Amino acid sequence: MLLALILALTGTIISTPAPQDAAPSATSRPADGSAEQFLESSRIRLYDIERAGLESMAFSLPVTTPHPTTGESMRLGDVAVRWAAGSEPQISASVANDLPEAMASMTEMLEAQLIGQGQQVLGYVRNDLFLGLLEGYDATLGGTEDGLVHVHFEPKQRDQTGQPPIDGYFRDHVPVRLKISIEAMNVEMSFDHTWRPVSETDSTLVLQELTVTQDLGFAKMEARTTFDYSWSGGLLVLSGYVEEITPPDAPMASNDVRLESVQVNGSPLGAASGSGSGADSADG
């Protein structure tokens, strides 16, 4: 849940770690043209599940969070997501009715957070890292830094709360890191992603791991999420993820989340699996 709160603050954002000592390559340098053209070339490197045949998706997501006094995992609520190509997603949230007294008055805020988490997970399902970003930001190319192409994202509405500027870094058109500085909160954040090929015969990439580091100046917090996929009707579909949260001066907490009641193009997850079932074991 902590990772969901971080992502709800900053929106849909992505990155991937890259070797610091690697030399720039010809494909790392931005070609002549606009940032939009560069980002479109980046999209091609990523698995396009809609082009592969995803027309609709539905799932529910149980959400847990640490108890405010005991620290033990407790149910916060559930979020249901329905999406069809060409239409806006339908997302509904249900906050648990047995929350601790300290959280009982926060129902509206918690419901908004649940909906935000549903939106984020749907973004992972669709594997489109720029969709939400480009809706709210203008992108400009900023040259290269340490062999990585720098793309700066400036919010279209400069006074929009929760939309600080973002600096993205790309290697060979693959997003490798995003950095965010929230001056009002004195917070520095970085988002590092690890990718893997869809299968031995499909070299487009799906997200394998996301690491979010939040630097408060006096302390650092890290949240790492590892994503799991299943083949369903010839499509590689997100089936769940594992969060590992390392707060400052506290033991790591782990949370295993499975998508429930999943329907892919109207059929249950795993129905009519395609021939690429070996992709689950592909290296990232």
Image (spheres, rainbow, N blue to C red):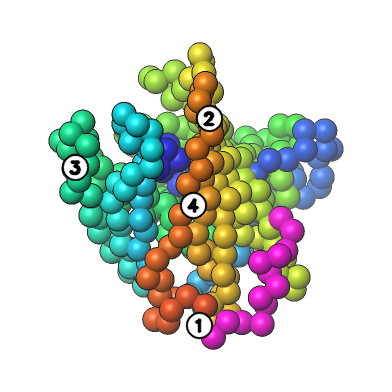
Residue 96, position as x, y percentages in the image = 23, 49
Q: Are marks 4 and 1 in contact (CB under 8 Å)?
A: no
Q: Circle 1 sits in a helix, a strand or a loop, which is it?
A: loop
Residue 130, position as x, y percentages in the image = 50, 52
The label number, if any, that marks residue 107 in the structure image: 3
The number of numbered badges drawn on the structure is 4
Residue hosting label 2: 251
Residue drawn 33% across and 44% down? 74
Q: Nearer the viewer, mark 1 or mark 2?
A: 2
Q: Nearest the camera: 4 or 26?
A: 4
Say what amino acid the circle numbered 4 marks: Asp
Classify mark 4: residues with Cα within 10 Å, few (<14), some (14-19) or many (20+).
few
Is residue 276 within the magenta segment?
yes
Real-space Cα separation, disc 2 to disc 4, in angstroms? 17 Å
Residue 146, above or below 183: below
Residue hosting label 4: 256
Give the mark, 1 or 2, whose residue is nearer the N terminus: 2
User: Which stretch is magenta?
Assistant: 271-284
Real-space Cα separation, disc 1 to disc 2, in angstroms? 39 Å
Classify mark 3: residues with Cα within 10 Å, few (<14), some (14-19) or many (20+).
some
Residue 128, above or below 221: below
Q: Circle 4 sits in a helix, a strand or a loop, which is it?
A: strand
The label number, if any, that marks residue 271 in the structure image: 1
